[in-house]
Amino acid sequence: MPLLGGVRPPIVLLLLLLLLVAAATVVGLGAVHSDRVPEAVLNSEQQIASDTALSVRTAIDAEASTVRRTADAYPATSASTPTATLKALTAAGKADLGSALLDAHTGKLLASGGAPVALAEAEAARKASEQGTIAPRLVTSGATRLLYFARVTLPAQQVDADQDQNQVPTGERQWLLVVSEALPTVTTFGDGRIAKVLNANGKALITASRGATAPTAADSGLPASASRAVNASGRDTDASGSLVGAATSPRPTVAGWAQVASTTGPGDTDDLGLVVLTSRAVPATTAATDYSGIALEAAAALAVIAVVLGLALNFLVQRPLLRLYLSAGRLARGATEDGVAEKAELDRPVPVHGIGELARIGRALESLRRQLLGESGPQEFPARRGPGYRALAAFSLVLVACWALPMIFVLNRADAGSVPAPVIANQQARAELAANRVRQSLDQSYVELNDVAASLPGKSRAAQTEELRHALSKHGQYRSLYLLDRSGAITLRVGDTPLRTLVHVPHGGGVTTVNTSGRIPAIASYAQVRPAKGQAAADGVVLFGEIDVTTLNSTLARPNLGTIWVTDADCKVLAASEGYRAFQDLPEAGLTRLARAAQSAPGTVGTATAKVLSTSTGPSVDAAAPLAQNGPTAHLGWRVVTAEPAAALRLPATQAQQRTMLVGILALAFGAACLGWLHVVVIRPLRAVAALIEKLAGGDRRTVLHPVNHDEIGSVTRSLELIRQALADRSRAARAEQVDDPFGLWRENTLQR
C-alpha cells in the first residue's frame, strides 16, 4: 500500500519555506532605497493640496448655501419691486462685487447693482438648470469671479382695476438672484509654501504664499503638469496627486495638486474645473540608504539554520523511521509467513537507530524478535525516559525563533531621527488645515444659527416653533434647538433633549460648550434674539443650537493624517476621528504637552507645533494647532491635535522595519507550522506507538493496535499488530499443550530447579 503523507513532507517543506524567506529577505530589504525626495514627502504634499482643495470647496459651498438661504428667507410680497428686493438680498453681502435680478422664465434683467454681472454666463446657467438648484459658475473673462444663483419666489402681483387683465401675470412670480463674488481666499500653511488655484487650462487664478519662498518653489512648469494630470483623471472627480519640479538644485520643488470637486456625489464645485496646486522647496536626501548588506547576512544565517534543521531532521527522524519501518515489516513477515527466507528474517537483529521514541521502539522490537524465536520472555522497560522528539522539535523552533525574534523586535528599527524634517513640517501644516476645517464648520453653524435667530422676532410661539423645526430639518448638524429666557430656563425647544448642564445666558453670539462631563460633549452655537422693532423684549433672548458631535467627528478624518482630536482649553477631548471618549485626556502625555505648547491660554493667538514623539508602538509624527485666531471660536482656547505613526509613512527606515518584521514573522510562522505538522503526523503518533510496543514487549497480548494513518507509522503499527497476533497464537498454543500434558509444566519447573 502506498504511503500517504508521512515524515518527508513537513521536513522538506520546512527547508523550502525557510529558504524562501531567506530569498525574500534579500529581495525585500535590497529593494529599499532612498530617493532624492522621499515618497512620504510627496504623499504629504499631495494631502496638503487635497486638504486645501477641501477648504476651498467648503468655502464655495458655504457661500452658495448662504445666497440660497438668504433668498429663501426673504419675506417677499406681491408689492415687492426688483430694485428693493435686490437691495434687501445683498445688503449684508460684504464680498459682493455685483448682483442682478433676472426674470427666471425669460432671462430679462430686472435690476442690478455693483459691478456688472456677466449676464451671458447667468443666462447660460439659467437655461442649463430650468428646475432645481443652479450650481455656481466661474467667469474668467476680465476679472475672475464666481457667480452664485438662487431663486426668489414672490406672490402674484395684485391686479390693478385699470390694467388690461390680459397683461397681468397670474400665479407666483419667480426671479433669479445672481451674485458675483471673488474667489475664496486661499490660506497657505507651512513656511515657504506657495498655493495656487488654477482653472481647467492651468492658469493661476489665485496665488498665496507664506513666509519666504525659495525661487524654485514657483516652478513655472508645475501648473501645466498639474493640468495634464487633471485632464487624465477626469475633471469632475476629486482626484489628487504629487509632482517633483524640474530643478536640480539641492532643494527640489515638491508639489501637490487636487481638484476642487465633491467626494460624495454631485456638488456645487464639480463643474468649475478648479484645481489647487501647492508647492514647496525641500532639502534633497543626500545620505544613501542601503540595506542589502544586512539583508545578505540575515538571509545567509537563515539559510544555514534551514540546512542544519533539514539535515538534523533527516538523520535523526526521517532515516531512522524509514529503517524502523523496514525492520517492523521484516519481523511481521517472519512471524506470519512459513517460507524459509521469511523465517530467516527473524534471525537478523533489529538495529536501534535514532533517539527518543524511535530508539525505544527499536529496543522493544528487538525484544519481540527474540520472543518470536523463543529466546526470551516478556521484558519490562524503565519508566524514565530521556529527551525525545518533542524536545528536538522544541529546539528546532527555538533555533528558528533565535533568528526571527531579533528581526521582529530588534533589527532595522525606525527611530525619531529617521523622519525627515519636511515630513514633520507637513504634519504641522496638515494639523493647521484640520483646525481651519473645524473652524469653518463651527463658523458656518454659527452663521446659520444667526440667520435662524434673526427670523424669530415678532412671531408667535407657534410660528417660532415651526421656524425652529424647519431649521432643524434643514441643518443636519444640530441635534437640538432651544430658546433661553433671561434666567437661563428653556422656553422653547425642538429636537432631542438638551445635553447642557451649565446654565448661563451669554451675551452676543459664538460657540461654546454647555457641559463639562458625560459621554457626549454639548458643543453649541448661540445667538441673541433681538426684539422686533417697536415691541418689547421676548421671553426667549438667546437661541442655542447644540451641535451633533458625530457631525464634528466626521469632519476630522483625512487620509494619512492619523488620529485627530479636538481638545478644550484643559486638553480634554471634545471630538476625535477614532477611539472617541468624551472629556478624556489625550492617550499620550507627550500629546498633552504638545497641545499645551500650541496655545498657552484661551484667547491667545497660539502657534502650531510638531515633533516626533516616542510611543510604545514606535515613533509617531505629532502636531498641534490652535483652532482659531479670530471669529466666534477664537476665545475658546481649543486645539486640534494629530498623531500619525511613523510606520504608516512611506519612508526607507519604516519600509525596512516593516519588511524586516514581515520576514521574521513569516519565518516564525512557517517554522511553527511545519514543526507543528511534524509533531501531529510523526512525533505524537510515535509516542503512542512507543508506549504500545513496550506494553506488547512486556507481555500484553490483548491490546489491539489500530493503524491511524497511511504512512510510515501506520505501516509500523500494522506490522506490530501482525506480530501481536503471532505472539498471541503462540501463547494460546502453549496453553493448549499444557492442557494436554498437565505434568509438563511440573517437570519443566523441576528441571529448572
Image (cartoon, rainbow, N blue to C red):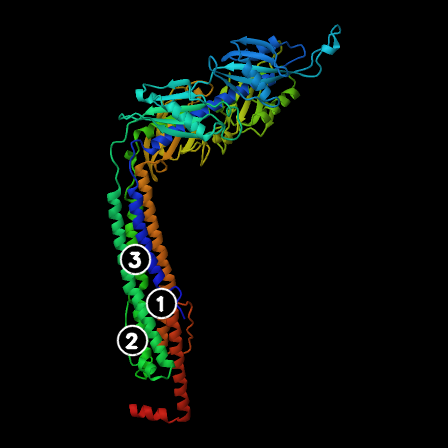
Q: Nearer the viewer, mark 3 or mark 2?
A: 2
x, y (%) of residue 152? 62, 16
Q: Residues within 10 Å of mark 1 (few under 14, many from 20)?
A: many
What residue sits right under mark 1 in the picture?
A: 686
What residue sits right under mark 3 in the picture?
A: 396
Q: Disc 1 marks which amino acid?
A: Leu
Q: Residues within 10 Å of mark 3 (few under 14, many from 20)?
A: many
x, y (%) of residue 575? 46, 31
Q: Is residue 369 above or below residue 511?
A: below
What residue sits right under mark 2 in the picture?
A: 350
Foreground of the two, 455 or 246: 246
- Quadrant into which the N terminus falls: bottom left
Residue lying furthest top: 162
Foreground of the two, 215 or 396: 215
Rendering quarter of residue 79: top right
Kindly report the distance in space between the C-alpha atoms of the residues bearing marks 3 and 2: 29 Å
Can residue 238 be seen here? yes
Kindly report the distance in space between the C-alpha atoms of the residues bearing marks 3 and 1: 18 Å
Q: If you read the primary sequence from the N terminus, does the residue marked by circle 3 or circle 2 appear first?
A: 2
Rendering quarter of residue 701: bottom left
Question: Does dot 2 land on a helix, a strand or a loop?
Answer: loop
Q: If you read the primary sequence from the N terminus, does the residue marked by circle 3 or circle 1 appear first?
A: 3
| Residues at marks 3 and 2 touching, judged by CB atoms closer than 8 Å | no
x, y (%) of residue 591? 36, 31
Q: Disc 3 marks which amino acid?
A: Ser
At horizontal 37% and vertical 70% (from top left) the residue drawn is 689
Q: Is residue 352 above or below residue 203?
A: below
Q: If you read the primary sequence from the N terminus, does the residue marked by circle 1 or circle 2 appear first?
A: 2
Question: Does dot 3 land on a helix, a strand or a loop?
Answer: helix
